[in-house]
Image: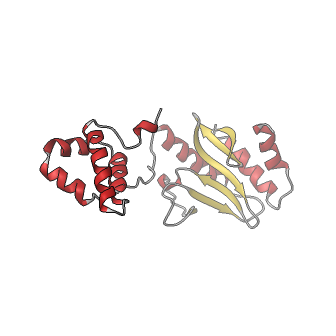
Amino acid sequence: MEKCEKIDLFYQEEHPFSEGVNTLRQWIKECGLEEDYKWQLPTYTWNKKNIVSIAKFKKHYGVWFFQGGLLQDAEGVLQNAQEGKTKAMRHWKFTAPQPDNKALVKAYVLEALENEKQGKRIAADRKAPQAVALPELLQNEMKKDADFKRAFESLSPSKQRDYAEHISSAKREETKIKRWTTIVPMILDGKGLNDKYKK
C-alpha cells in the first residue's frame, strides 16, 4: 500500500475522533508542511525533518511535536511523551470531538517549524562509555612498558574491552598466560582482538 493510501485510510476510517483529526490535518497543512506517513501515523515535515504527527486513541487524539520541549508552551497544553525518559517529544491531547482553538494550534506548529528552520534541537542523551576494567596482567604490563601502554591506550574503547574480557574470562592461570602471550604482539601492532574476522 502506498503512503498516500495509508494516509487516506487513517483519515477516512470510522473512529470517534475522525472529525477532530481531519480538522487538525487541515490546520497543519495550512502551515506549509509536507504530509508524509511514518510510524503508522500521518507525519508533517519541513525539508524532510519531522515537525509534528497526528495520532488518535480510544479516549483522545492529538498532535505530537518532535521537538516540543523547545516550545514556549505559554498555555501549558503540552505533556511529556514519557516523563523522565523523553527529552524532546511533547503531546497535545484533545478529547472534544472537534478542536476549537485553530489560532493556538497553528501558532504552536509554526513555532516548531521556525525552531527547525533555525536548527534548534534537543539532542538525545548519549551514554558515556563505560570505563574498561583492566585485568592485573594488563595493568602490570602497562606499568612496566611505556610502549605497550601507549599502544593499548591508542586502541578504541571497544577493542580495549575485548582484550580485557579475553584475559579476564580465562578461568585457569595457564590459560590467561597463554592468551596473554598471543595478544601482546597484536596490541603492539595496533590490532583488535577480532580484526582477523573482519573483512
Residue toward you, 158 or 17:
158
Along the horizontal axis of the image, is 60 left or right of 128? right
Residue 189 percent across, percent down from the top left: 27, 35
Residue 131 seen in this snapshot = no
Say which quarter of the image contains residue 90. Answer: bottom right
Residue 2 percent across, percent down from the top left: 78, 37
Q: Residue lying at the far front in this picture: please name it.
A: 174
Residue 93 percent across, percent down from the top left: 65, 62
Residue 172 seen in this snapshot = yes
Along the horizontal axis of the image, is 77 left or right of 163? right
Which quarter shows the N terminus? top right
Residue at image point 54% right, 55% down: 89
Along the horizontal axis of the image, is 121 left or right of 80? left
Q: Residue lying at the far right in this picture: please name it.
A: 14
Residue at image point 36% right, 53% down: 166
Along the horizontal axis of the image, is 113 left or right of 62? left
Residue 19 percent across, percent down from the top left: 80, 55
Residue at image point 85% right, 52% down: 13
Residue at image point 75% right, 38% down: 3
Say which quarter of the image contains residue 137. Answer: bottom left
User: What is the image's colouring?
Assistant: secondary structure
